[in-house]
Image (cartoon, rainbow, N blue to C red):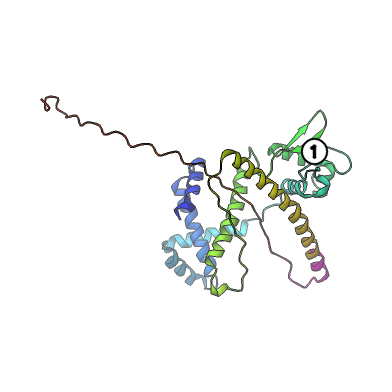
Amino acid sequence: MRQLLAPLARLALAQGVTHATLDELMKQALVDAADQAHAALPPHRRVSRITTATGIHRREVTRLVTALREGAAQQQPPARSHASELFAHWRSQPAYLGPDGTPATLPRQGPAPSFESLAQAITRDVHPRSLLDELLRLGLARLDAETDTVRLVRDGFVPQGDQARMLQVLGRNVGAHLEGAVDNVLHDAASAGAARHFEQAIFAAGLSDSSMAAFRQLVTDQWQATLQALVPALERLIEADAAQAAATPDAPAPRHQVRLGLYTHARPPSPPAAPPPAPMPETPDDPDAAS
């Protein structure tokens, strides 16, 4: 558990988040989880059960449950990011890739393949120049004014210079990974019919600096291949589900959401342990004591 919380503590300190704020957020999360776990109980019994399960005072539970339900009623689903969708298409659609399979440098305007045609394939509601300005603002693309061409300068959609969005990306990615991992840990005989989330990892040690550089390039190449294979395939599945839903309007609409990520964490070699300090001779407080 400490290994899980240590990165969160580092982030909180870096962002100036105090213990009081973290304590309030943790209480909200505990009460929310307990509330969902006992959703079948009537409200007056649910508060008592949440208090027993969490150890939080009944009055606090009532306050937090009220705040959570009011917040859920006001919460809007996150708007789709046209910038992130354009970024994914640029990295996965064959028409916008170079001979080596990496995102091609595109003319800003003109027929496909161009940035204009790519932007218009994503949405007709936002002008291509506005989408380009957003990518430039986030540090994801670069415009060459002399050649009037645009190229991607980052491998992943991690907006630079936009702290709020960077934290949002972090929350969604790490939150989804942690939620899937926790589901797998809590998976038991009672939910044997439920599908587990895919979660695998590779561990290696003893790599030199040059091997680490080769490893990073290998991961980048593998992720690019994964994008090129999965993004079009997922889009075909979504289109097929939409057509099926249109043909059978009485059937339940598809509601599943998936998030697939690839991460690496490289820990630098630990410095050699410093030798213990040499023992210092004791010096009496009274200079005349040694005489």
Circle 1 — which element? loop
Q: Which residue is at 47% across, 47% downward?
A: 9
- At label 1, which amino acid type do we have? Thr
Q: Considering only vertical position in the picture, is 282 above or below 204? A: above
268 and 228: which is toward the camera: 268
**Where are the magenta residues, as a range?**
242-258
Q: Considering only vertical position in the picture, is 251 above or below 142? A: below
Q: Which residue is at 70% across, 39% downward?
A: 140
Q: Is residue 253 magenta?
A: yes
Q: Is residue 201 magenta?
A: no
Pinpoint residue 217: horizontal percent, then vertical percent: 66, 43
The outermost residue toward the right is 111
Residue 123 visible within the image: no
Residue 184 visible within the image: yes
Residue 130's quadrant in the figure?
A: top right
Pinpoint residue 56: horizontal percent, then vertical percent: 42, 61
Q: Could you tell me what secondary structure mostly forms the magenta stretch?
A: loop
Q: Which residue is mark 1?
A: 105
